[in-house]
Image: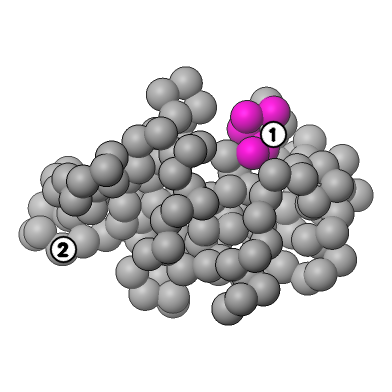
Amino acid sequence: MSKTAKFYIYYDAKTDYLEVSSGKMKTVSEDIGNGIFILKNPRGRAVGYGVLDACDRVEKLDFLDPLVKFAVQVKIERLKRGFTQAQLAKRMGIGLLPCQRLESGQNNPTLKTILKLKEILPEVSVDDLLAS
């Protein structure tokens, strides 16, 4: 997936299933093993990934762009705690739009925002962000 693509992140906390894609239409998936799927559009073009047992595997998803991987972690940890984006934003003392951008996979969060986030969601790893 391209770094310039707009990503859509879907996480279902009940089934612990995660989708990260650059397209909304996903009709075909190809199993690449270990509970990871390549999501394809009807023309057979790869548009993203699907992951089973996402909570346990997200740290190992090295094929994701570091910003997308960070965004996925933020969303999973937020949903595990039952927070809405507005609730997380309020706890962090930031506006809703900056909070939504944390889950977009497209914007570089500031150090100040990352530190506020780590206070609320300490399980979110920033190692990949710092290494990129």
Helix, strand or loop at label 2? It is loop
Say whether residue 20 is left or right of residue 28. Answer: right
Q: How far is the residue under mark 1 from the one under mark 2?
A: 33 Å
Bin the neighbour count of mark 2 within 10 Å (Cα to Cα): few under 14, some 14-19, many 20 and up: few
Res 96 label: none
Res 45 label: 2
The residue at which mark 1 appears reads as: 84
> Which residue is pictured at 37% across the width and 74% down the height?
2
> Which residue is pictured at 45% across the width and 53% down the height?
60
Q: The disc labelled 1 sits on which kind of residue?
A: Thr
Helix, strand or loop at label 1? It is loop
Task: Mark yes or no: residue 56 visible.
Answer: yes
Bin the neighbour count of mark 1 within 10 Å (Cα to Cα): few under 14, some 14-19, many 20 and up: few
> Which residue is pictured at 33% across the width and 69% down the height?
1
Range of magenta residues: 77-81
Instruction: Give whichever of discs 1 and 2 has the lower sequence position.
Output: 2
Which residue of the protein is positioned furthest toward the left in this rendering? 43
Based on the picture, tell me whether residue 80 belongs to the magenta stretch: yes
Q: Position of residue 14 (x, y in %)?
A: 47, 21
Which residue of the protein is positioned furthest toward the right in this rendering? 93
Dominant SS in magenta = helix
Q: How many marks?
A: 2
Q: Is residue 37 above or below residue 111?
A: above
Task: Mark yes or no: residue 25 visible.
Answer: no
The one of 126 and 109 positioned closer to us in this rendering: 126
Marks 1 and 2 in Cβ contact (< 8 Å): no
